[in-house]
Amino acid sequence: MVDERHDVVVIGAGFAGLYATHMLRQKGFTSVTLERGSDVGGTWYWNRYPGARCDIESLFYTYSWCEELNEEWNWSERYPAQAELLSYARAVADRYGLWDNIRLDTEVVSAVYQPDKAEWVTRTSSGSVIRSKYLVAATGCLSAARPVEWPGMQHFDGKVVRTSDWPEDGVDVSGMNVAVVGTGSSGIQVIPELARSASRLTVLQRTPNFSMPARNRPLLPAEVAAFRVESARIRESAKHHPSGYDTNVTGLNLVDQRPEDVQKELTRRWESGGSALVWAYADVLVDKRANEIAAKFIRDKIRAIVDDPAVADRLTPWDHALGTKRPCVDTNYYQTFNRPNVEVVDLRQEPISGFGARSVELAGRSIDLDVLVLATGFQAFTGSLDRMQIVGADRISLREKWEDGPKTFLGVAVSGFPNFFMITGPGSPSVFSNMMVSIEQHVEWIVDMIESLRDEGASAVMVSEEEEAKWVAHVDAVASQTLFAQHDSWYVRYGRSGNRVFMPYLGGVGEFRRLSDEVAGRGYKEFIRL
Ligand code: N01
């Protein structure tokens, strides 16, 4: 049964899907946006754990096309909390009349390309079948949780919750024995919050991470006013900045500076808050010597903050270069380990050996447990696409095509998948940028291309395998010149044949925009007209 037909099906109503929905309407396309969650907001709908907050500053983490709304919107703090971001997403949908195009609680089960009709057939969890000329995945880079399993987990009869799917009505941990697994950005944000009310909090840590203080605080009216006056210039400069965000890059190499000047600059950035410390010098992510100096600065801070030297040692990162795992930004993370009710366990020394009905068993001891919190991360980039069956022109699914790691052109298109586009896909700079800036660039590029194809009268287009291979090689070549080549993280995927793929593009937002604009300027000649 075929229910309906649109020019475009958009999957996801997070910030990427909302802008795509708006822009498609503006350009006169018919579209429907299918959203798995019960609200808009994407990441900021699902990740509602206590302490969830963006590490890009509020005023910068906004759409540039919503200046009218931005003028009225009062962010309360320097870094936006999840609830405010969700309200902002809803306000955008209200203000720009997007709700009519959005279908909530609707999961895409499959999307199959029909070459004979040059159309996509999308099937949803509610049984609808939607035909469309184009399919746009706005499914997010960090959406599908990474599955984790320990021996004997089935014996545990307490509560198990994920930060990435926190219950809407919250979890009351007061008086409870709580354990958190995972010390990435999510764990580092939730741990100080849970420690305040739990009776006992055990952090089950596999790998210590670098974290810097956010120095979150209420936004001052004067800084909001100053931003508003300068917003057009700030937005324009962000579009061409490597990270799409003013991280105050000095452009200098750390190794060429006087040690006392380096310490002064790192201290200044530590005191002002956020992750700007990592971006202080051009060589930190490239030269081991520079990286070690910046890393040591943070290690020394950890030792100064944490009272017990043995606990400080456990929390001190040792296995990766600073910045090669996404650096975390926190509020009182290291200070939390000075509380008498908090313990950090090194899982490499004391692995989880099993679970009791109300305990977690470590090699040699048992810890009472009522609530197990999983802050164990995501199947980055590909997970959200893998959970539906996307089948291209040759009857091959995206999952099969990417068995040796994702291959894309500019992170937006895939050979073998005509008229299919991704927003912030693998091979794009997205996760290394202010997501809002990357989202806007991708959406505008994709919708402009669709518009140009309409003008041209093209029925279907597909990027050539050769252009895709060139882009994959370029992404790899850029990454291989950095320290990212030496350390694994969620940025990396190993293929079936053991090959290592570094997924994001490290060339920067400005360079990516320049290259994307060149493709558009050449009339999208990298795409074969079918
Ligand atoms: O996930 P992660 P996340 N046993 O993958 C551990 C964005 N974000 O949700 O390092 C034991 O970083 C794993 O250990 P290891 C941001 O881009 C942004 O925290 O693999 N431990 C690691 O410690 C971020 O980078 C914001 O050894 C296990 C942790 O779980 C990205 O989302 C806030 C394990 C996973 O860390 C992902 O962050 C939150 C196992 N079996 C998120 N499996 C802000 O804007 C995994 N781990 C502030």
Image (cartoon, rainbow, N blue to C red):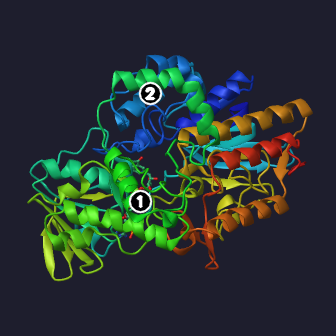
Q: Nearer the viewer, residue 340 or 119?
A: 340
- Mark before the other along the chain sequence, 1 or 2: 2
Q: Secondary structure at mark 2?
A: helix
Residue 343 pos. (x, y %)? 16, 65
- Residue 80 visible in the picture: yes
Q: Is residue 188 above or below residue 484?
A: above
Q: Are marks 1 and 2 in contact (CB under 8 Å)?
A: no
Q: Secondary structure at mark 1?
A: helix
Q: Is residue 513 above or below residue 71?
A: below
Q: Residue at x 60, y 33 (%)?
A: 33
Residue 415 pos. (x, y %)? 79, 57
Q: Is residue 467 above or below residue 458?
A: below
Q: Nearer the viewer, residue 128 or 291?
A: 291
Badge nearest the viewer, 1 or 2 = 1
Residue 509 pos. (x, y %)? 63, 47
Q: Nearer the viewer, residue 58 or 422?
A: 58
Q: Residue at x 55, y 68 (%)?
A: 484
- Residue 162 visible in the picture: no
> On the image, which quarter does residue 12 sit in?
top right
Report crowding for label 1: few under 14, some 14 to 19, many 20 or more residues within 10 A (C-alpha): some
Quarter of the render that holds ligand 1:
bottom left
Q: Residue at x 74, y 24 (%)?
A: 27
Report crowding for label 2: few under 14, some 14 to 19, many 20 or more residues within 10 A (C-alpha): many
Q: Amino acid at mark 2?
A: Tyr
Q: Give the labeled residue for mark 2.
A: 88
Residue 525 pos. (x, y %)? 89, 48
Distance between mark 1 and mark 2 Cα atoms: 39 Å
Q: Give the labeled residue for mark 1.
A: 262
Q: Amino acid at mark 1?
A: Val
Left or right side of 122 for 36:
left
